[in-house]
Image (tube, rainbow, N blue to C red):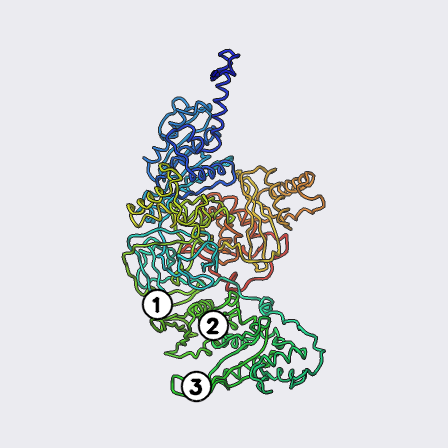
Amino acid sequence: MTVQPAFGELGHLDDAEVFRRLQAAKRAAAQDLLRDPATLARGLDAGYRMRPHLKVISEALVGLERGEYDRLLIYTPAQVGKSTTVAEWFPFWWLLLHGEDRVAVASYSDDLALRRGKAIRQYIGEYGGEYGLSLLPGSEAAQDYDTNKGGGVRSVPLGGSLTGFPVNLLVVDDPHKDRAEAESKKMRDRVHDWWSSAALKRLQPDRNAVVIIQTRWHCLAYDQPVSTVIGPRSVQDIQPGELVLTSNGYQPVLATAARLHNGETLTFGFYGSPETLRVTPEHRVWTEHGWREAREVQRLDWMLLPTRPDAEMTAEELGTLLPAPPSPRRDLGKTTRVKNAPVSREQLQAHLDDGMTYQQIAEMYGRKTRAAAYEWARALGITKPAGKVLSPECLHDPDFWTVVGLWIAEGTLTYGKAKDKSNVCRWSFGEHEQETLAARTRDVLKQYGLTAAVNLRGSADRCEWVDGDVRQTAVVTVSSAQLAGLLQQFGHGARNKHLPDWAYRLPRSHALSLVDGWASGDGCDYVNGFKRVSSASFRLLRDMQTLLAKHGIAASVMRTGEGAGTQHELRYRASGGNRHIRTDERGLWVRVKRLETTQYDGPVYDLQTPTGDFVAGGVLVHNCDDLAGRRLEEDGRLEDGGRWKVVHLPAIANPSKFGPDPLGRRDGDPLPHPKIPTRNRRRLLAWWDDVKRTSTVRDWHALSQGDPQPSEGALVSRDLLRSIRDGITVVEPQRIAVSIDPSGGGRDTAGIIGGFLGADNRVWITHDKTKAMSSAEWSRTACLLAHETNAGVIYVEWNYGRDMCTLAIGTAWQALQDEGAIPKGKLMPGIDAVSAKQGKLLRAEPIAQQMVEDRIRLRGAFVDLENEWATWQPTDADSPGRIDASCVLVYGLIPEANQGAIVHAPLPTAPQPGRFGRGGTVSGPASAYGRRIGK
């Protein structure tokens, strides 16, 4: 047997050529390692163990480098290799690809940040030579060093300085050291301030990316009820996408979080509400003094149940509530007699016109069931049981809404055969109410085209009431598919009645008539001037309480029974509330009645919503406010149109709770570990079970499952800016515009904002294209935005070269048409110069007032724009481009905004409607183009 030499194929080459080829192969292998950070670590470090979860994290880091997104959040348990991969190998890998970039690594402590910096420096020294990367001679400090390609690394603790260090890649390796630090408002504010004042300000425009490794913390107790669109639901049952009540109506849940808690919880009881709120001490709640940690709230403090912010319906919108009448299903010109039918078509139609039901007609002609009468109607060509057409004028009559309220209290819908569902509407009153409520219902329906029958039902010997009287039931019956279609939106069955969303937008007279009808139908009692109305539907009581609060009437919801027979009642009086409940334009305020501190060992939860808040226990509470929570709240998730890519890898998979698992695991599957073979499921489960048993109970979900500020002196607060975000409301644009604050005046940032004046007379900001640009660049950007939004006018600031702006925009429009970016035949928008006031405060403050009065809305989250408004001080010598451009836009679209300014004390944190917006009278259309603003 002949053995071939190992390098036989190279035998004809001299030593120099063999060495050259081996070096080339080595370089090719080195380049192949650059596919992703985990591959690089595996190829260079024999101790690095590749696992599926590290591959998922590594692929997410590659997406960050490629620019598919620029923000990444990673949640995994401790000691699974994430920090080594993300905070050490990833920065090294980044520098191999972008040697000229500068990387900042931040952590909760100086020691940990220093350790990360040393590891990266070690990799550069040991492996960088293969890629032409080395430390710059004389620059070898552990916390701050440069490379031969112009890049560098700085390691700092959270709160540390990045002054003089531009950043292309920022890695935050857990901003909070432990639970105590995460639960400290002072420490959380310190992290938020550092993020805003240091971290973001150092990111570079050419290329920047941020990755955060974070453990989530504080939340609500597991069984805490949260107000959802289908009624109260325990927080642990709520899934992403469900609609929950927030400070801006019902909003979708963006994400949920959970962990185990072993420590104190606070339970609040309230005057005027049977609900309680149970939270961890650091969770924030809304009080009369703004957001406060629960531990800071005292007995008799005021807390808020927000009202629905919807504007009152117009007459046109009110007319759309009534369903269209059904079309006939048979030709009415058929035979007038049918075999064996004891009645003619004319007679049958006359009976129906008189308000008789099919059951009554059948009994009149000796039949026991209504099926026979249905058969006669089909054979004679009579549409059954659609009934007559209801006049749309009824929707504008408060008396009709009283009848609707009576149905909510006493009504049902009768089901016939499948094709005739819910066409028969019934009101059931006591015999003593036959000549009052029953007669009133019949007369109102008759006024608008419906003939209702009033009949006494039930046998007298089987109708004994609680008071001993023997009475029958007075039933009002009417057949109308239109009316049934309206009434069924209020729910079926006593325990399922509720108010539809549109009921909160009814005019005041209609809404109060609805409530009065419901109260009369349910037999309200009067005690000390208060109306007391009971109901089996707690959701209906809460809805009525919210509706009354929207119209300035404070109502209490109280428990009236215990055990299986528990019911609740609504108590109110038209004159308002009492010393423990009150209303204002924001909603219903209730006082804390009791406050208890208890030890709790179990799961706690949190929800993320677009507004940053939600209603639990009948009051407004905040999202979790750690760094990750604030970032997701302000910037949103990538899949929801936001900015942050989130990789969530819990120790034990739970896709039914968290959604699809990145590793494709099923419920109960363990997360791989670097020191345990991936296929050894039993060892992995045993390991995570041991981690759970040896960890504090409180920390298991936070650490292993990953499942758990306004600047003083600014014109507006971050809370106010979040509250005016609205990406849901459908608004018809009346005038679309682009505004420009040209670069100049000592800075090179051009402010470009797009938006429109809506039919609701609000300015809606839709686009922010602000960035550092030359005049040639900002004019092209503005023209492209005007083309994209089909704007009819471009507003420019008069103070900065009106003629220059006009020339630049006209030149850019022509150039873009020549390039084909804008169609040749499309006319350029008009150019209007807005003369803004010279003083920055005089210019910005009226616009801030428009936000307070809910005259301005944001079509989504505009992080940079909101940050500028929330941090700019009136004493600053200059104002940012986004503020100036948004001022120009508002002055152009609603010139009357410049009628004055109000200094706010304290700083508003929610819209407070006055002359404009929800709850107020909206002014007429904005004036014509060309009006100059200011003096």
**Pair 3/1: label in front:** 3
**Are there few (<14), some (14-19), or many (20+) residues within 10 Å of tag 2?**
some
- Residue 265 as seen in the image, left or right of residue 237: left
**Pair 2/3: label in front:** 3
**Residue occupying image coordinates x 51% and y 62%:** 310
In the image shown, does 628 or 336 lie closer to the viewer? 336
Amino acid type indicated by mark 3? Arg
Residue 513 in sight in this render: no
Amino acid type indicated by mark 1? Tyr
The residue pinned by badge 2 equals: 493
The residue pinned by badge 3 equals: 462
Q: Which of the two labelled residues, at mark 3 and mark 1, occupies the earlier sequence position?
A: 1
Q: For residue 393, which quarter of the picture?
A: bottom right
The residue pinned by badge 1 equals: 271
Reply above or below: 501 against 353. Answer: above
Residue at disc 1, secondary structure: loop
Reply above or below: 574 against 853. Answer: below
Amino acid type indicated by mark 2? Gly
**Are there few (<14), some (14-19), or many (20+) residues within 10 Å of tag 3?**
few
Residue at disc 2, secondary structure: loop
Q: Disc 2 versus disc 3: distance between alpha carbons?
A: 23 Å
**Are there few (<14), some (14-19), or many (20+) residues within 10 Å of tag 1?**
many
Q: Which of the two labelled residues, at mark 2 and mark 1, occupies the earlier sequence position?
A: 1
